[in-house]
Amino acid sequence: MSNNLQLVWLVPLLPFLGFLITGLGRNSLSKGATGLVGCGSILLSFVISILLFLSVNAGHTGVVNGFDFISYDKVSIPFSFQVDQLSSLFLLIITGVGFLIHVYSTSYMHGEESPHYARYFSYLNLFVFSMLLLVLGSNYLVMFIGWEGVGLCSYLLIGFWFKNNAYNYAARKAFVMNRIGDLAFLIALFWIISKAGSLNYAAVFSHASAFTQKDLTIITLLLFVGATGKSAQIPLYTWLPDAMAGPTPVSALIHAATMVTAGIYMIARSNLLYTMAPATQWVIAITGLATVILAATIALKQNDIKKVLAYSTVSQLGYMFLALGAGAYTGAVFHVMTHAFFKALLFLGAGSVIHAMHNEQDIRFMGGLKKYMPVTHITFLLGCLAIAGIPPFSGFFSKDEILVGAYAFHPVLYYIGVAGAFMTAFYMFRLYATTFQGAFRGTHEQEHHLHESPAPITVPLIVLAILSTIAGFAGIPALFAEGAHALAHFLEPIFAPSERVHPAHELSHQTEWMLLAGSLVVAVAGAAIAYIRYSKTPDLKEAEGVGKVLENKWYVDELYDNTVVRPLNALGRFSNSVVERLGIDWIVNGVGKTVQYGSRQLRFLQSGQVGNYILLMVVGILLFFAIELFFKK
């Protein structure tokens, strides 16, 4: 094992120390010191992650043991980290993108008071620490600790501005909906340990062939339910758009580098189990594809700049699950990487716009911002080109790898996926054109104060724009150049066991060219139609008919409210008024009142007169003898 692998403990430790320093010193640290600690801890983790990545690329992988975490009977679960191709790649994404978001935050959140500014960075550091723990664990239990940690941090950061009750509700909604998925995850862990006697990845995967098909299906479905919560898939996706209540850099961190990628990582890590459970693969593929279409249709009619991007994230996550279900694990991880770059770019670009517009988020009151914000404009455009899948930008390569994998799994999945690609290009260029093109539609006061954002905001945008442009070349498909897919070669040791169980369907280069051309034409058409329609005189009148339904998000929140939330609240009120007050309280209070009443009556026996006491003693003795004589007869 390479000595560099021993440095892995520093990767999560440094953000955790940053969390402690900024959290405990929030009342004494200056904003400069807070930013230095918060950003510096992530930067050092990123540097160490690069060293680990280079070691892994040189062939050095392994498990770095810490201590025995749980040990009983024949079961031993260590607290240890697994450094391999998959975890090292995620380390780069989490710490690299996370660092840029931290730097961005030093300017974006500068208006916060010092204690809250430090509190924000402490939460942000804890978020990164939890995600690093999740991807580094060598067993499902350490993963679950990180899994719960990112859930807690999302609650803290979504509700960061806790004086606003609407934000508190959004934070609570995210927390509760994730608990639903987490319960399924926890049940799966108990099921695994009952069958394999361990939660260590190596032991579970080596024992997988001994699992019955029923066990494999149940375990993988339970884990997938957990993933639907963290990675916002149908039906547990509605918390993610509401997570926009938090500061914009938080949205970027949640949507790009941390929480929502947890479900994809977990399934990619467990790829062998899923390959051996074909029924679950179909469930994942269909759920992912349904999420792609549902979220994309909603994004078509959203007018809040962050809500468009939020539903875009839900839709793009659906593509990743489509790839996982189709067995295209490399494609799913590839899209995680490219999506981290362009989605972080888009959210931070949106934050730059919101900052310039004095917290205005409605795109109907924007327009023409490109002449006031040239850097934000060009970087945002590059992000839109990447997510729309226009070559040579990164999203083109990763999206088409997913669609090709879907076609190989079943052609119908490809055609529906292409429809989602058309909508993606359309709503993203609707957003771009409405925000940056045409005439400004805001107030004169807003226009007077429009300006480009400072360097701590624009520099991360430029770096992410470059990555969004070039990252796709890590996965050049074979039809362009044989053996040029560097990422597939790098991840081969992780996904090779699944390939041995079910070899991938090979498509001819001619078929791949046709699939690529078809999806490209559709994406270009969607982008062009949206640009032409919204760049000069955008049609932004009140939505009607189907448009109104899409604007109101298919009324899914209202459906959940009427079928789940209100009945549960009614049950709670009934339990409080009938069961608790008229039932439990009546019994408990009744016992107390009975004892109290009896005590009040018995006290009259204590009159203080000796004659009465002697009389009672004589009566008692007579009663005693009478009872004795009665029982003798």
Image: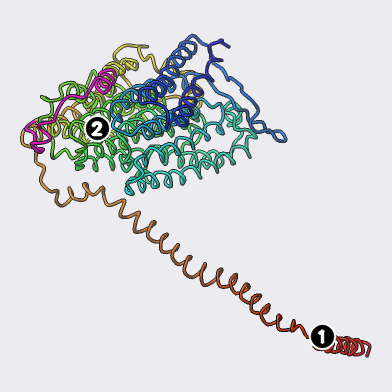
Q: Please tell me the numbered disc located at residue 56.
A: none
Q: What residue type is labelled 1?
A: Val
Quarter holding the N terminus is top right
Foreground disc of the pair 1, 2: 1
Q: Earlier in the sequence, mark 1 or mark 2?
A: 2
Region of the chain picked out in magenta, as a range: 438-463
Tell which residue pokes out farthest to the top in this image.
Answer: 58
Image spot of residue 621 (x, y percent) = 88, 86
Image spot of residue 77 (x, y percent) = 63, 31
Q: Are marks 1 and 2 in contact (CB under 8 Å)?
A: no
Categorize mark 1 by other alpha carbons within 10 Å: few (<14), some (14-19), many (20+). few
Tell which residue pokes out farthest to the right in this image.
Answer: 632
Q: Please tell me the numbered disc located at residue 421.
A: 2
Image spot of residue 408 (x, y percent) = 35, 29
Q: Marks 1/2: CA distance?
A: 100 Å
In this rendered view, identify the residue nearer to me: 216 or 560.
560
In this rendered view, identify the residue nearer to me: 369 or 488.
369
State whether residue 84 is above or below residue 220: above
State whether residue 37 is above or below residue 321: above
In this rendered view, identify the residue nearer to me: 434 or 297.
434
Q: What residue type is labelled 2?
A: Ala
Categorize mark 2 by other alpha carbons within 10 Å: few (<14), some (14-19), many (20+). many
Secondary structure under badge 1?
helix
In this orientation, does residue 411 appear? no
404 to the left or right of 22? left
Residue at coordinates 15% horizontally, 33% vertically from top-left?
435
State whether residue 85 is above or below residue 72: above
Q: Report which quarter residue 194 is drawn in.
A: top right
Secondary structure under badge 2?
helix
Quarter holding the C terminus is bottom right
Q: Total label count?
A: 2
Q: Which residue is denoted by mark 1 in the rendering?
A: 610
